[in-house]
Image (cartoon, coloured by chain):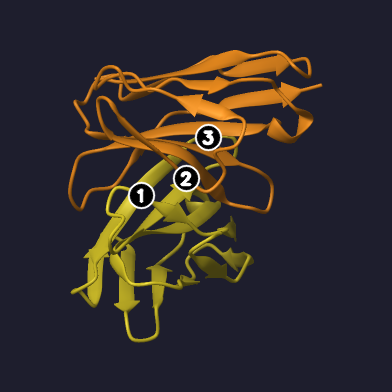
Chain colours: A yellow, B orange
Amino acid sequence: SQQGEEDPQALSIQEGENATMNCSYKTSINNLQWYRQNSGRGLVHLILIRSNEREKHSGRLRVTLDTSKKSSSLLITASRAADTASYFCATRNTGTASKLTFGTGTRLQVTL
Amino acid sequence: NAGVTQTPKFQVLKTGQSMTLQCAQDMNHEYMSWYRQDPGMGLRLIHYSVGAGITDQGEVPNGYNVSRSTTEDFPLRLLSAAPSQTSVYFCASSRQGAHGYTFGSGTRLTVV
């Protein structure tokens, strides 16, 4: 079964706006990761946040993690048309550190 | 570095045929995994490996076999193809520990 569930399923914004995507998961984790997938391509790793971290930044990306609520959010600031893609959260669960379990993804459309 | 290489990129099979999807990585990664991606369902884990000679089942292993005789290669075998196995298949690899996965570009398989 899927571990993570992303919300919303689809998001449409204009260039320059911020995009926020949320991920909820079910069990205890070692870390949570976010990936991007452009249409018809493989996934690209964006950022990893460990279970003992609450916030992490990478360029225009900001990830937060709330282990008490079993949720994470990905914020993309000042979105660009090139950010149009699907975004997935994935978890490495406690006790199964080699397995990465994905959510169903958020489709982001950034228009000019 | 080539990263993760998957072959073939496209394949059409008839029901009942068998085939092997190839996956090779040149990054000396310990962990390797196979996923399938179907519309609206995100990525589902088929099989994974933590090192040469060690494999384990993921969420949807039925109808697939894997082996890991070397660190570099992790082939996925479809034993008797069924239309339900029509999907896009991704291979991915990672170092041990808290690291993201590197994905291949995928194999689009159609079973008729």
Image x and y of residue A100, in percent: 38, 51
- Give the residue at x 64% y 53%: B41
Is the residue B108 above or below the residue A41 in the image?
A: above
Relative height, residue A23 to residue A100 (above, below): below
Marker disc for residue A99: 1
Residue A41: give its label. 3
Instruction: Name the secondary structure under disc 1.
Output: loop
User: Disc 3 and disc 1: Cα gap in Å?
Assistant: 22 Å
Q: Is residue B77 left or right of residue A99?
A: right
In the rendering, which numbered label is found on residue B58? Answer: 2
User: Which chain does the numbered disc 3 sit on?
Assistant: A
- 3 or 1: mark nearer the eye: 1
Residue B19: percent from left, percent from top? 60, 13
Query: Which image quadrant is residue B6 in?
Result: top left
Residue A73: give x, y in percent of width and height: 41, 73
Q: Alpha carbon of mark 2 to alpha carbon of mark 1: how far?
A: 8 Å
User: What residue type is disc 1 on?
Assistant: Lys
Categorize mark 1 by other alpha carbons within 10 Å: few (<14), some (14-19), many (20+).
many
* Same chain, labels 3 and 1: yes
